[in-house]
Image: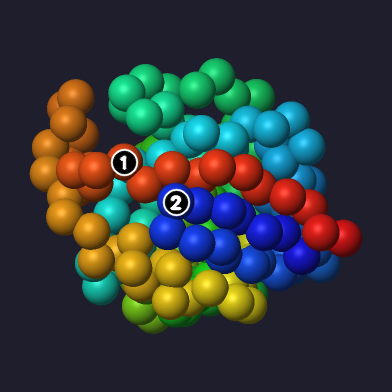
Amino acid sequence: MITITTTHGDIVVELFEEAAPLSCENFRQYVADGHFTETIFHRVMPNFMIQCGGMNADMSEKETRAPIKNEADNGEKNVRGTLAMARTGVVDSATSQFFINLNDNTFLDHGGRDFGYAVFGRVTDGMDVVDAIAAVATGNSGGHQDVPLEPVLINEVRNED
């Protein structure tokens, strides 16, 4: 289990080690490196998802390791409460950023509109925190849309295993 401590409360996550071994190993390494500490939820879209893992409070991007192979063909679905790797339009471009699905977002699944977004875990406790983050007021900042007007920080991410 992983605990994501935010300014809105704790989110406890179970990783899908068997279904998404590369994504889980990548995520655990970023946790071990302390990468997520003091990053923000930089994209909040009610009824869709909340995204984090790569931006500082001033909207500057953190340095990342090399991108990983996309595991969206692992059979896991982008349903409410699951975590998936964020990426660019390039299929194998995921690094540290991830999102938590607020709804069943089947159009993000493998084979929907494109290769899809790799699901690698799910929230086991703290969906009330996820929903609270999803409800914050957002606006534009530094060329980005859907940015919380008041930063929602990740204080710490801990591996509880």
Kind of residue at badge 2: Thr
> In x, y percent, where is residue 5?
58, 53
**Residue 71, position as x, y percentages in the image:** 64, 56
Tell whether 149 sits left or right of 88.
Answer: left
Q: Which amino acid does label 1 sit on?
A: Pro
SS for callout 1: loop
Q: Distance between the residues labelled 2 and 1?
A: 9 Å
Q: Residue at x 71, y 41 (%)?
A: 31
Q: Which residue lies furthest to the left in this view?
A: 139
Q: In the image shown, does 108 or 158 lie closer to the viewer?
A: 158
Q: Work out whether 160 lies above or below 125.
A: above
* Badge 2: residue crowd in 10 Å (few <14, some 14–19, many ≥20): some
Q: Residue at label 1?
A: 151
Q: Residue at x 37, y 21 (%)?
A: 60
Examine the rendering and report whether any part of residue 23 can be seen: yes
Q: Tell me where residue 63 appears, x and y as whole percent.
A: 55, 19
In the picture of the structure, the residue carrying the numbered disc 2 is 7
Local secondary structure at mark 2 = loop
In this rendering, position of residue 47 left or right of residue 76? left
Q: Residue at x 55, y 42 (%)?
A: 155
* Colouring rule applied to residues: rainbow
Q: Is residue 77 left or right of residue 3?
A: left
- Disc 2 + disc 1, Cβ < 8 Å: yes
Compared with 49, 85 (above or below) is above
Q: Residue furthest right?
A: 161
Question: Is 116 placed left or right of 118 in the picture?
Answer: left
Asked whether 63 or 75 is in front, the reply is 63
The mark that comes first in sequence, 2 or 1, is 2
